[in-house]
Image: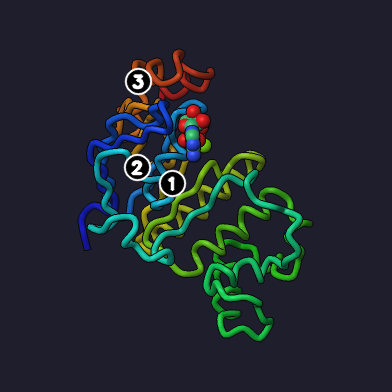
Amino acid sequence: MNKFIVEVEQAYVVFDSHQALIDINVQIPQNSFVAIVGPNGAGKSTFIKSLLGLVNLTSGTIKIDGRSPQEVSPGDIGYIPQVKTMDRTFPALAIELVITGLDYRWPWKRSHPNIDRAYEALQRVGAEHLANRQISKLSGGELQRVCLARTIAREPKLVMLDEPATGIDAIGETDMYNMLESYQTSSCATILMITHDWHAATHHADYVLLLNRKQISFGPPAEALSEDNLRLAFGHIGHSHRLKFLVK
Ligand SMILES: Nc1ncnc2c1ncn2[C@@H]1O[C@H](COP(=O)(O)OP(=O)(O)O)[C@@H](O)[C@H]1O
Ligand SMILES: [Mg+2]
Protein backbone atom coordinates (compact mmCIF):
# COMPACT_ATOMS: atom_id res chain seq x y z
CA MET A 1 0.00 0.00 0.00
CA ASN A 2 1.30 3.45 -0.91
CA LYS A 3 1.73 6.08 1.75
CA PHE A 4 -0.31 8.41 -0.44
CA ILE A 5 -3.65 7.22 -1.77
CA VAL A 6 -3.87 10.15 -4.21
CA GLU A 7 -0.90 11.78 -5.95
CA VAL A 8 -1.52 14.60 -8.40
CA GLU A 9 1.32 16.26 -10.28
CA GLN A 10 1.13 19.33 -12.48
CA ALA A 11 -2.46 18.58 -13.42
CA TYR A 12 -4.19 20.82 -15.95
CA VAL A 13 -7.71 20.49 -17.38
CA VAL A 14 -8.74 22.69 -20.30
CA PHE A 15 -12.31 22.58 -21.65
CA ASP A 16 -12.36 24.14 -25.12
CA SER A 17 -10.47 27.31 -24.28
CA HIS A 18 -11.47 27.41 -20.59
CA GLN A 19 -8.76 26.47 -18.10
CA ALA A 20 -10.72 24.65 -15.38
CA LEU A 21 -7.70 23.37 -13.42
CA ILE A 22 -4.25 24.94 -13.51
CA ASP A 23 -1.16 23.22 -12.12
CA ILE A 24 -2.64 21.15 -9.28
CA ASN A 25 -0.09 19.32 -7.10
CA VAL A 26 -1.29 17.34 -4.08
CA GLN A 27 -0.33 14.23 -2.18
CA ILE A 28 -3.12 12.90 0.00
CA PRO A 29 -2.05 10.50 2.77
CA GLN A 30 -3.97 7.28 3.36
CA ASN A 31 -6.66 7.41 6.02
CA SER A 32 -7.14 11.18 5.93
CA PHE A 33 -10.21 13.41 5.68
CA VAL A 34 -9.78 16.09 3.02
CA ALA A 35 -12.16 18.98 2.37
CA ILE A 36 -12.08 20.55 -1.08
CA VAL A 37 -13.14 24.17 -0.85
CA GLY A 38 -13.56 26.97 -3.38
CA PRO A 39 -16.12 29.25 -5.05
CA ASN A 40 -18.55 28.16 -7.77
CA GLY A 41 -16.77 27.27 -10.97
CA ALA A 42 -13.46 26.76 -9.14
CA GLY A 43 -12.98 23.32 -10.68
CA LYS A 44 -13.85 21.30 -7.55
CA SER A 45 -16.15 18.82 -9.34
CA THR A 46 -13.72 18.65 -12.26
CA PHE A 47 -10.93 17.74 -9.84
CA ILE A 48 -12.91 14.85 -8.34
CA LYS A 49 -14.05 13.68 -11.78
CA SER A 50 -10.45 13.63 -12.94
CA LEU A 51 -9.54 11.37 -9.99
CA LEU A 52 -12.40 9.10 -11.03
CA GLY A 53 -11.19 9.03 -14.63
CA LEU A 54 -14.42 10.69 -15.79
CA VAL A 55 -12.51 13.77 -16.98
CA ASN A 56 -9.13 13.39 -18.70
CA LEU A 57 -6.26 15.66 -17.75
CA THR A 58 -5.02 17.90 -20.52
CA SER A 59 -1.57 17.41 -19.01
CA GLY A 60 -0.04 16.13 -15.77
CA THR A 61 -0.48 12.86 -13.89
CA ILE A 62 -2.80 11.32 -11.33
CA LYS A 63 -2.09 8.20 -9.33
CA ILE A 64 -4.65 6.47 -7.13
CA ASP A 65 -2.82 4.08 -4.83
CA GLY A 66 -0.04 3.96 -7.40
CA ARG A 67 -2.29 3.37 -10.43
CA SER A 68 -3.82 5.61 -13.07
CA PRO A 69 -7.54 6.39 -12.59
CA GLN A 70 -8.35 4.17 -15.59
CA GLU A 71 -6.60 1.20 -13.96
CA VAL A 72 -8.53 1.46 -10.71
CA SER A 73 -11.49 -0.87 -10.46
CA PRO A 74 -14.75 1.08 -9.95
CA GLY A 75 -15.48 -0.86 -6.76
CA ASP A 76 -12.33 0.51 -5.09
CA ILE A 77 -13.59 4.08 -5.10
CA GLY A 78 -16.85 5.29 -3.68
CA TYR A 79 -18.39 8.35 -5.32
CA ILE A 80 -21.44 10.35 -4.37
CA PRO A 81 -22.25 12.98 -7.00
CA GLN A 82 -24.15 16.15 -6.21
CA VAL A 83 -27.70 15.22 -5.14
CA LYS A 84 -29.30 17.47 -7.69
CA THR A 85 -27.89 15.30 -10.46
CA MET A 86 -29.86 12.24 -9.29
CA ASP A 87 -33.32 11.40 -10.60
CA ARG A 88 -35.33 11.12 -7.41
CA THR A 89 -38.46 9.86 -9.13
CA PHE A 90 -36.70 6.65 -10.10
CA PRO A 91 -38.87 3.80 -8.72
CA ALA A 92 -36.66 1.89 -6.30
CA LEU A 93 -36.61 1.00 -2.65
CA ALA A 94 -33.72 2.23 -0.51
CA ILE A 95 -32.43 -1.33 -0.03
CA GLU A 96 -32.45 -1.87 -3.81
CA LEU A 97 -30.41 1.27 -4.34
CA VAL A 98 -27.86 0.01 -1.79
CA ILE A 99 -27.66 -3.37 -3.57
CA THR A 100 -26.70 -1.60 -6.83
CA GLY A 101 -23.53 -0.54 -4.99
CA LEU A 102 -22.61 -4.20 -4.61
CA ASP A 103 -23.87 -5.68 -7.83
CA TYR A 104 -24.45 -3.71 -10.99
CA ARG A 105 -26.55 -6.44 -12.60
CA TRP A 106 -30.21 -5.95 -13.38
CA PRO A 107 -32.78 -6.76 -12.13
CA TRP A 108 -32.25 -6.83 -8.41
CA LYS A 109 -33.94 -9.61 -6.48
CA ARG A 110 -35.23 -9.46 -2.94
CA SER A 111 -33.50 -12.79 -2.32
CA HIS A 112 -30.30 -11.27 -3.57
CA PRO A 113 -27.12 -12.86 -2.13
CA ASN A 114 -25.92 -9.39 -1.13
CA ILE A 115 -29.03 -8.47 0.81
CA ASP A 116 -27.38 -8.99 4.22
CA ARG A 117 -24.42 -6.83 3.26
CA ALA A 118 -26.79 -4.15 1.99
CA TYR A 119 -28.72 -4.16 5.30
CA GLU A 120 -25.44 -4.02 7.19
CA ALA A 121 -24.38 -0.95 5.18
CA LEU A 122 -27.71 0.73 5.97
CA GLN A 123 -27.19 -0.13 9.63
CA ARG A 124 -23.74 1.48 9.64
CA VAL A 125 -25.27 4.82 8.64
CA GLY A 126 -28.28 4.46 10.94
CA ALA A 127 -30.73 3.97 8.06
CA GLU A 128 -31.92 0.38 8.46
CA HIS A 129 -35.45 1.66 9.05
CA LEU A 130 -35.45 3.23 5.56
CA ALA A 131 -34.73 -0.05 3.75
CA ASN A 132 -38.23 -0.58 2.39
CA ARG A 133 -39.09 3.03 1.64
CA GLN A 134 -39.32 4.36 -1.90
CA ILE A 135 -36.36 6.65 -2.58
CA SER A 136 -38.77 9.22 -4.03
CA LYS A 137 -40.34 9.52 -0.54
CA LEU A 138 -37.08 10.16 1.33
CA SER A 139 -36.01 13.58 2.62
CA GLY A 140 -32.73 15.04 1.34
CA GLY A 141 -30.87 13.91 4.47
CA GLU A 142 -32.38 10.41 4.35
CA LEU A 143 -31.46 9.99 0.71
CA GLN A 144 -27.90 11.10 1.46
CA ARG A 145 -27.68 8.39 4.13
CA VAL A 146 -28.92 5.74 1.72
CA CYS A 147 -26.46 6.94 -0.95
CA LEU A 148 -23.68 6.77 1.62
CA ALA A 149 -24.72 3.21 2.55
CA ARG A 150 -24.62 2.30 -1.15
CA THR A 151 -21.14 3.78 -1.41
CA ILE A 152 -19.62 2.12 1.67
CA ALA A 153 -21.24 -1.29 1.08
CA ARG A 154 -18.12 -2.40 -0.83
CA GLU A 155 -15.80 -0.86 1.75
CA PRO A 156 -13.88 1.35 -0.68
CA LYS A 157 -10.59 2.75 0.63
CA LEU A 158 -11.33 6.08 -1.03
CA VAL A 159 -14.69 7.85 -0.83
CA MET A 160 -15.39 11.06 -2.73
CA LEU A 161 -18.44 13.21 -2.12
CA ASP A 162 -19.51 16.23 -4.14
CA GLU A 163 -21.22 18.73 -1.83
CA PRO A 164 -23.05 16.11 0.26
CA ALA A 165 -24.42 18.76 2.64
CA THR A 166 -26.35 20.63 -0.05
CA GLY A 167 -30.09 20.37 0.52
CA ILE A 168 -29.84 18.95 4.04
CA ASP A 169 -30.21 20.82 7.32
CA ALA A 170 -27.44 21.59 9.83
CA ILE A 171 -28.22 18.52 11.96
CA GLY A 172 -28.12 16.38 8.85
CA GLU A 173 -24.77 17.91 7.99
CA THR A 174 -23.33 17.12 11.43
CA ASP A 175 -24.64 13.56 11.10
CA MET A 176 -23.00 13.31 7.71
CA TYR A 177 -19.62 14.35 9.11
CA ASN A 178 -20.00 11.90 12.00
CA MET A 179 -20.90 9.02 9.68
CA LEU A 180 -17.97 9.79 7.40
CA GLU A 181 -15.53 10.06 10.29
CA SER A 182 -16.77 6.79 11.71
CA TYR A 183 -16.35 5.08 8.32
CA GLN A 184 -12.89 6.65 7.92
CA THR A 185 -11.82 5.16 11.26
CA SER A 186 -13.48 1.75 11.05
CA SER A 187 -12.36 1.02 7.46
CA CYS A 188 -9.06 2.97 7.37
CA ALA A 189 -10.49 4.89 4.44
CA THR A 190 -9.66 8.27 2.94
CA ILE A 191 -12.49 10.75 2.50
CA LEU A 192 -12.49 13.57 -0.06
CA MET A 193 -15.40 15.90 0.33
CA ILE A 194 -16.28 19.01 -1.65
CA THR A 195 -17.95 21.59 0.53
CA HIS A 196 -19.00 25.22 0.42
CA ASP A 197 -18.89 25.40 4.19
CA TRP A 198 -15.21 25.84 4.91
CA HIS A 199 -16.05 26.63 8.53
CA ALA A 200 -17.38 23.10 9.11
CA ALA A 201 -14.38 21.80 7.19
CA THR A 202 -12.00 23.36 9.70
CA HIS A 203 -13.51 21.22 12.45
CA HIS A 204 -13.58 17.89 10.66
CA ALA A 205 -10.93 17.78 7.95
CA ASP A 206 -7.29 16.77 8.40
CA TYR A 207 -6.39 18.66 5.22
CA VAL A 208 -8.01 21.30 3.06
CA LEU A 209 -7.46 21.79 -0.66
CA LEU A 210 -8.42 25.38 -1.46
CA LEU A 211 -9.04 25.86 -5.16
CA ASN A 212 -9.91 28.63 -7.53
CA ARG A 213 -8.92 26.98 -10.80
CA LYS A 214 -5.38 27.30 -9.45
CA GLN A 215 -4.41 25.55 -6.25
CA ILE A 216 -4.44 28.26 -3.59
CA SER A 217 -3.33 25.97 -0.77
CA PHE A 218 -3.20 22.40 0.49
CA GLY A 219 -2.51 21.61 4.13
CA PRO A 220 -3.98 21.45 7.62
CA PRO A 221 -7.15 23.63 7.82
CA ALA A 222 -5.71 26.47 9.93
CA GLU A 223 -2.84 26.86 7.47
CA ALA A 224 -4.70 26.26 4.22
CA LEU A 225 -7.57 28.57 5.18
CA SER A 226 -5.49 31.55 6.25
CA GLU A 227 -7.06 34.96 5.71
CA ASP A 228 -4.83 35.64 2.73
CA ASN A 229 -5.68 32.32 1.14
CA LEU A 230 -9.43 32.82 1.65
CA ARG A 231 -9.17 36.24 0.08
CA LEU A 232 -7.31 34.79 -2.88
CA ALA A 233 -9.96 32.08 -3.35
CA PHE A 234 -13.15 34.02 -2.67
CA GLY A 235 -12.08 37.63 -3.07
CA HIS A 236 -13.16 38.29 0.53
CA ILE A 237 -12.84 36.55 3.89
CA GLY A 238 -16.26 34.95 3.74
CA HIS A 239 -18.86 35.05 6.47
CA SER A 240 -18.64 36.04 10.14
CA HIS A 241 -17.65 32.55 11.31
CA ARG A 242 -14.16 33.52 10.31
CA LEU A 243 -13.85 35.70 13.40
CA LYS A 244 -14.82 32.84 15.72
CA PHE A 245 -12.29 30.66 13.97
CA LEU A 246 -9.53 33.23 14.43
CA VAL A 247 -10.07 33.68 18.16
CA LYS A 248 -10.40 29.98 18.85
N1 LIG B 1 -17.58 18.91 -19.41
C1 LIG B 1 -17.36 20.23 -19.43
N2 LIG B 1 -17.24 20.91 -20.58
C2 LIG B 1 -16.97 22.23 -20.62
N3 LIG B 1 -16.83 22.99 -19.51
C3 LIG B 1 -16.95 22.39 -18.31
C4 LIG B 1 -17.23 20.97 -18.21
N4 LIG B 1 -17.28 20.65 -16.88
C5 LIG B 1 -17.07 21.80 -16.20
N5 LIG B 1 -16.87 22.84 -17.05
C6 LIG B 1 -16.56 24.21 -16.67
O1 LIG B 1 -15.39 24.18 -15.86
C7 LIG B 1 -15.51 25.10 -14.79
C8 LIG B 1 -15.36 24.36 -13.47
O2 LIG B 1 -16.54 23.57 -13.25
P1 LIG B 1 -16.75 22.69 -11.95
O3 LIG B 1 -15.58 21.77 -11.81
O4 LIG B 1 -18.10 22.08 -12.06
O5 LIG B 1 -16.69 23.79 -10.79
P2 LIG B 1 -17.17 23.68 -9.26
O6 LIG B 1 -17.51 22.26 -8.97
O7 LIG B 1 -16.01 24.19 -8.46
O8 LIG B 1 -18.35 24.61 -9.13
C9 LIG B 1 -16.85 25.80 -14.96
O9 LIG B 1 -16.61 27.02 -15.63
C10 LIG B 1 -17.65 24.84 -15.81
O10 LIG B 1 -18.59 25.51 -16.58
MG1 LIG C 1 -19.29 21.36 -8.41
In this rendering, the answer to whether 21 lies above or below 161 is above
In this rendering, the answer to whether 35 lies above or below 159 is above
Tell me the residue that label 1 is attached to. Answer: 49
For numbered disc 3, what is the local secondary structure? helix
Label placed on residue 229: 3
Which residue does the image show at 32% across and 25% down from the upper left? 216
Which of the two marks, 1 or 2, is nearer to us in this view? 1
Percent position (x, y) of residue 246? 40, 20
Percent position (x, y) of residue 146? 62, 60
* Quarter of the figure with the N terminus: bottom left
**Which of the 4 image quarters holds residue 235?**
top left
Label 2 Cα crowd, 10 Å radius (few <14 / some 14-19 / many 20+) = some
112 or 240: nearer the eye? 112
240 or 1: nearer the eye? 1
Tell me the residue that label 2 is attached to. Answer: 206
Q: Is residue 70 visible?
A: yes
User: Which of marks 3 and 2 precedes in the sequence?
Assistant: 2
